[in-house]
Amino acid sequence: MSAPSITRQQGLAWFGQHAAALDAGTGYADDLLTELGRQGLLRIGVPEEYGGSGGSLAHAIEAIAEVAEHSLTAAFVFWGQRTFIQYLLDTPNAALRTRWLPQLLSGELAGATGLSNAMKYLSGIESLQIKATPQGEGWRLEGHLPWVTNLRRSGFIVAAAVEHADGSASIVAIPHDLPGFTRSDDLDLVALRGSNTAALNVSSVDITAEHIIHEDARNFCPRVRPSFLGLQLGMSIGLARVSLRVAEEQARGAHGAVLPSVHELRAELEKLAAELYAGLGEGRYTGDASSLFRIRIRLAEIVQDALSTELDATGGRAYLRGRGDDFVRRWHEAAFIPVVTPSLSQLRGELARHHGGTAT
């Protein structure tokens, strides 16, 4: 992937300037999505016929990685929005795509990927948390989603999996203004507090066929899992890159001993990124999810190793206010990488089930 242009770099600087506020939740949360839209970042990897700027999914992942180098909160929101956009690119419901995609691409409307529950359901980890019963010409929904990101109060739409009485499941899009659909206050996160992350309560919410992303969740989820997870990995790639770059810059004198580790980690990081992009381009991970899981696990480990290396290179300065603030923010951000769905423990458990009890 080529480096971002100077113009792109100037735009990305906005996320760095406001990274501390976005992480602490003290401002700019509602401006974040608008800025992603204004810079055209949400259109990357979207076919021009749908209002995008073209390119591949790999280009979209790289864009998320570029943003993650400046702010993981911004990259987290970017991932959620871009993943919802991908659902609309993959839906057979053309009317749904036509109605909502323009507002999502511009950043006018927030798109929330509430399919973490569905991905766990697909792996047999938990049951679906929203039930659907027939109601008139559509369905009535009841349930709860405890953790959803990118729920901007000015307007959002959420993708969710719903279970029917016969045990089948569908993927639906629920706009924020449907009666009975309510958002909690923001969750009290340790970091990434400007990500508009909250819980959703679904109480007698009525939907019709116009809200259906896909009628068969068991068919849809495996098809979109590579993009769901691939786009998410942009966060790990970007955070590891910036940490290794700072480590290299800080390695002076006695701290120069960390340079071999920096170079080794960077080489492995870029090798894994290239492997990810090749596999996505070939459609390999639809039938070979285990390989994608292993990349996710190793990238998360590299993030932790990169932050430890940055700390080694920076030394005690990392604990001085005003000198190590960016490092402390990245340290908090990195703690989120292992637990974002699918978490490392979930992936290792699934790999173990696939390989006779040993996750290798």
Image (cartoon, rainbow, N blue to C red):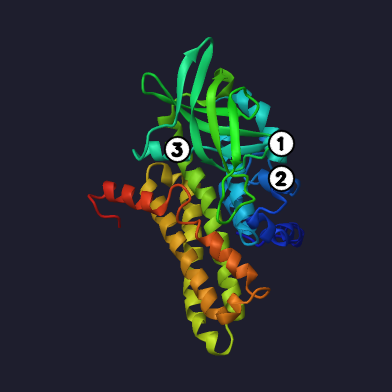
Q: Please state the total of marks drawn on the protein image.
A: 3
- The image shows residue 71 at horizontal and vertical percentages of 64, 58
**Residue 317 makes an appearance in the image:** yes
Outermost residue, bottom side: 253
Residue type for callout 2: Asp
Q: Position of residue 62 (x, y in %)?
A: 60, 55
Q: Disc 1 versus disc 2: distance between alpha carbons?
A: 8 Å
The residue nearer to you, when weighing 225 against 317, is 317
Which quadrant holds residue 155? top right
Q: Quadrant of residue 128?
A: top left
- What amino acid type is highlighted by mark number 1? Ser
Instruction: Identify the amino acid type marked 3.
Output: Asn
Residue contact between numbered discs 2 and 3, judged by CB atoms under 8 Å: no
Q: Name the residue rendered at 55%, 62% in the picture.
A: 332
Mark 3 vs mark 1: give the one in front: 1
Q: Is residue 248 above or below residue 26?
A: below
Crowding around mark 2 (Cα neighbors within 10 Å: few <14, some 14 to 19, many 20+) is: some
Residue at numbered disc 2: 30
